[in-house]
């Protein structure tokens, strides 16, 4: 999600006491007792040669093109498609 600098400044200028939390339930002791910490899987740096237009397309999608590339490859892997 992209947000303009102007909108970000507007949001940051809101005082905590002016935020309405009434529709958000509190996370009570039971929530924290059952909460689990899930750390991201470690990633390994690789060198990959990509065609320029493919790399440009990934970068045009916004920040995090390497993470997006990983997600695309993971989806293909998990779909069970086999390549030769």
Image: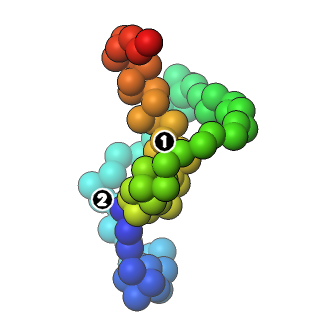
> Which residue: 63% across, 40% down?
48
Along the horizontal axis of the image, is 49 left or right of 52?
A: right
Sequence-earlier tag: 1 or 2: 2
Q: CA distance from mark 1 to mark 2?
A: 39 Å
Residue lying farthest right? 45
Is residue 53 depicted above or below 83 in this figure?
below
Along the horizontal axis of the image, is 46 left or right of 20?
A: right
- Observer-side mark, 1 or 2, equals 1
Q: Determine whether label 1 and label 2 are within 8 Å by CB.
A: no
Residue 22, labelled with which disc? 2
Q: Position of residue 31 (x, y in %)?
A: 48, 31
Quarter holding residue 81: top left
Quarter holding residue 17: bottom left
Along the horizontal axis of the image, is 39 left or right of 84?
A: right
Instruction: Tell which of 14 and 29 is nearer to you.
Output: 14
Is residue 28 depicted above or below 36 in this figure?
below
Q: Position of residue 3 (x, y in %)?
A: 38, 73
Mark 1 Cα shell of 10 Å, populated few (<14), some (14-19), many (≥20): some
Is residue 71 depicted above or below 33 in this figure?
below
Q: Position of residue 42 (x, y in %)?
A: 69, 31
Mark yes or no: residue 62 visible.
yes
User: What colouring does the structure picture have?
Assistant: rainbow
| Helix, strand or loop at mark 1 | helix
> Which residue: 42% across, 56% down?
53
> Which residue: 48% across, 41% down?
69
Task: Quickly name the residue at label 1.
Answer: 69
**In what quadrant of the picture does the N terminus appear?**
bottom left
| Helix, strand or loop at mark 2 | loop
**In what quadrant of the picture does the C terminus appear?**
top left
Instruction: Tell which of 20 and 43 is nearer to you.
Output: 43
Is residue 75 depicted above or below 64 in this figure?
above
> Which residue: 33% across, 52% down?
24
């Amino acid at each position: 999600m992209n947000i303009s600098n102007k909108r970000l400044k507007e949001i940051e200028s809101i005082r905590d006491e002016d935020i309405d939390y009434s529709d958000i339930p509190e996370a009570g002791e039971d929530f924290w007792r059952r909460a689990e910490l899930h750390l991201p899987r470690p990633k390994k740096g690789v060198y990959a040669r990509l065609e320029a237009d493919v790399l440009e397309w990934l970068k045009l999608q916004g920040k995090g093109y390497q993470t997006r590339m990983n997600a695309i490859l993971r989806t293909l892997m998990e779909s069970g498609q086999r390549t030769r």
